[in-house]
Image (cartoon, rainbow, N blue to C red):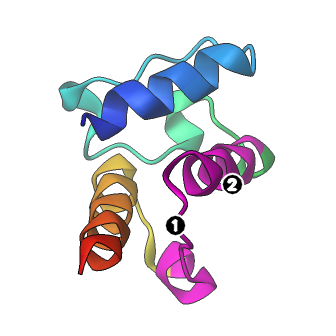
Amino acid sequence: MNILNDLNEILKKNNIKTKLTNKDMNSNLKDLGIDSLSAMNMIIQIEEKHNIRIPDEKLLEMKNVKDLVSIIEEQLKSKKK
């Protein structure tokens, strides 16, 4: 499973023209043209797609794309236990 592909699919579905790549991992979402409302929408859709719940405190710690991907991966691993 590739989290960046999932995120890009959601961005495209929501008419956001940003395409995330590995080069963007240290960029914050706002710098990539993804506002806070779009980011929350993206997170909700990831939660629904993978049947996970990302705690609000984890989202507050998020500084960049790498953090977001790590948080999602962490929740997916927790789900498998």
Horizontally, residue 65 falls left or right of residue 51, namely left
Alpha-carbon neighbours of circle 2 within 10 Å: few (<14), some, or many (≥20)?
A: some
Q: Nearer the viewer, mark 2 or mark 1?
A: 1
Residue identified by numbered label 2: 44
Please provide percent x and percent y for residue 35: 71, 42
Given the image, on which type of amino acid does mark 2 rest? Ile
Quadrant of the image occupied by residue 14: top right
Label 1 sits on residue:
52
Q: Is residue 13 above or below residue 69?
A: above
**Residue 62 appears in the figure:** yes
In magenta segment, residue 44: yes
Q: Residue at x 61, y 53 (%)?
A: 43
The residue closer to the viewer here, 19 or 76, is 76
Q: Secondary structure at mark 2?
A: helix
x, y (%) of residue 39?
65, 47
Residue 29 in percent (x, y) is at 52, 43
Secondary structure type for disc 1 = loop
Q: In the picture, residue 76 is in which quadrant? A: bottom left
Residue pictured at 68% horizontal, 54% vertical? 44
> Relative to 6, does residue 69 appear above or below in the rendering?
below
Please rate how many residues cluster around mark 1, counting C-alpha atoms within 10 Å: few if below 14, some from 14 to 19, many from 20.
Answer: some
Residue 10, given in percent of the width and then of the height, sits at 60, 27
Label 2 close to label 1 by CB (< 8 Å) = no
With respect to residue 44, does 55 lie above or below?
A: below
Magenta residues span: 38-60
Residue 43 within the segment the image draws in magenta: yes
Taking the spot 35% from the left edge, 43% from the top edge, the residue there is 27
Of helix, strand and loop, which mostly describes the magenta segment? helix
Three-letter residue code for mark 1: Ile
Q: CA distance from mark 2 to mark 1?
A: 9 Å
Does residue 16 show up? no
Q: Answer with left or right where residue 31 lies relative to residue 15.
A: left
